[in-house]
Amino acid sequence: MKVKDLCRKHGFSEPSYYAWKAKFGGMNVSDAQRLKGLEAENTKLKKLLANSMLEIDAMREVLKGK
């Protein structure tokens, strides 16, 4: 089956297929699951860092006014 037909059958574009293949092509299932978990954790940590930086900035503004 051609990639074009496979993508049409499952409802996604060819560039999406090739991006997925570049990212996950050489991995087995456990590696892909681990990567997905690490990406989720990384996203969570980035949000926590952004919130902490906002709090620090707000505290600096409050202290600057005193």
Image (cartoon, grey):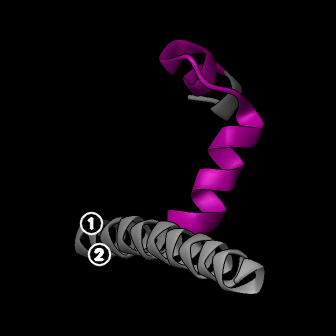
User: For the N terminus, which image quadrant?
Assistant: top right
Q: Is residue 53 magenta?
A: no
* Picture quadrant where residue 14 is located: top right
Q: Is residue 52 visible?
A: yes
Q: Is residue 18 magenta?
A: yes
Q: Nearer the viewer, mark 2 or mark 1?
A: 2
**Label 1's element?**
helix
Residue 31 place in picture, x, y as percent: 32, 77
**Label 2's element?**
helix
What count of labels does the image hold? 2
Q: Is residue 3 above or below residue 22?
A: above
Residue 7 place in picture, x, y as percent: 60, 25
User: For the C terminus, which image quadrant?
Assistant: bottom right
Residue 58 place in picture, x, y as percent: 64, 72
Which region of the structure is painted magenta?
5-24
Mark 2 Cα-neighbour bin, 10 Å: few <14, some 14–19, many ≥20? few
Q: Which residue is mark 2?
A: 34
For the residue pair 64 and 20, the one nearer the viewer reads as 64
Q: Which mark is residue 37?
A: none
Q: Looking at the picture, which amino acid does disc 1 mark?
A: Val
Q: Which residue is mark 1?
A: 29
Mark 1 Cα-neighbour bin, 10 Å: few <14, some 14–19, many ≥20? few
Q: Looking at the picture, which amino acid does disc 2 mark?
A: Arg
66 displayed left or right of 55: right
Residue at 66% x, 85% y is 63
| Residue at the front extreme of this rendering | 66
SS assignment for the magenta stretch, majority: helix
For the residue pair 7 and 57, the one nearer the viewer reads as 57
For the residue pair 25 and 19, the one nearer the viewer reads as 19
